Amino acid sequence: MEPAIEKDRFILSVKVGPKGQITIPAEARKMFDIKQGDTLMVMGDRARGIALIKDTEFYKIMEAPYGSNKND
């Protein structure tokens, strides 16, 4: 079965390897500009599942409610 891929969303499956590792599909790496050496945040909720987000995007989200800690 072909994966469902659209311009702004997709569903792809990955397998967990013996060390608990997964490979992020190329489509996802391209869409979210994930490159070798990038840091991803892993967030989990027992009821809703697991989410990955680039650390730079996570910090942007966290700045909104808490403000920037930069000295302007």
Image (cartoon, helix red, strand yellow):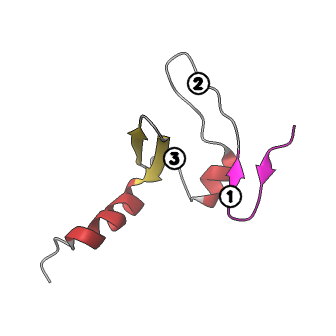
Q: Quadrant of the C terminus?
A: bottom left
Q: Position of residue 58 (x, y in %)?
A: 37, 58
Which mark is on residue 36? Answer: 3
Which residue lies under the disc numbered 2?
16
The x and y percentages for residue 7 are: 74, 65
Q: Are marks 3 and 2 in contact (CB under 8 Å)?
A: no
Count of marks, rendered view: 3
- For marks 3 and 1, the one nearer the N-term is 1
Nearer mark to the viewer, of 1 and 2: 1
Secondary element under disc 3, as helix, strand or loop, is loop
Circle nearer the viewer, 3 or 1: 1
Residue at the extreme bottom of the image, as rendered? 72
Q: In the rendered structure, which segment of residues is drawn in magenta?
A: 1-11
Per the image, label 2 sits on a secondary structure element best described as loop
- Hey, what amino acid is under mark 3? Gln
Residue 62 in the figure: left or right of residue 46:
left
Label 2 packing within 10 angstroms: few (<14), some (14-19), many (20+): few
Q: Secondary structure at mark 1?
A: loop
Quadrant position of residue 18: top right
Classify mark 1: residues with Cα within 10 Å, few (<14), some (14-19) or many (20+): few
Three-letter code, disc 1? Arg
Give how far apart the Cα atoms at labels 3 and 1 are. 22 Å
Residues at marks 1 and 2 touching, judged by CB atoms closer than 8 Å: no
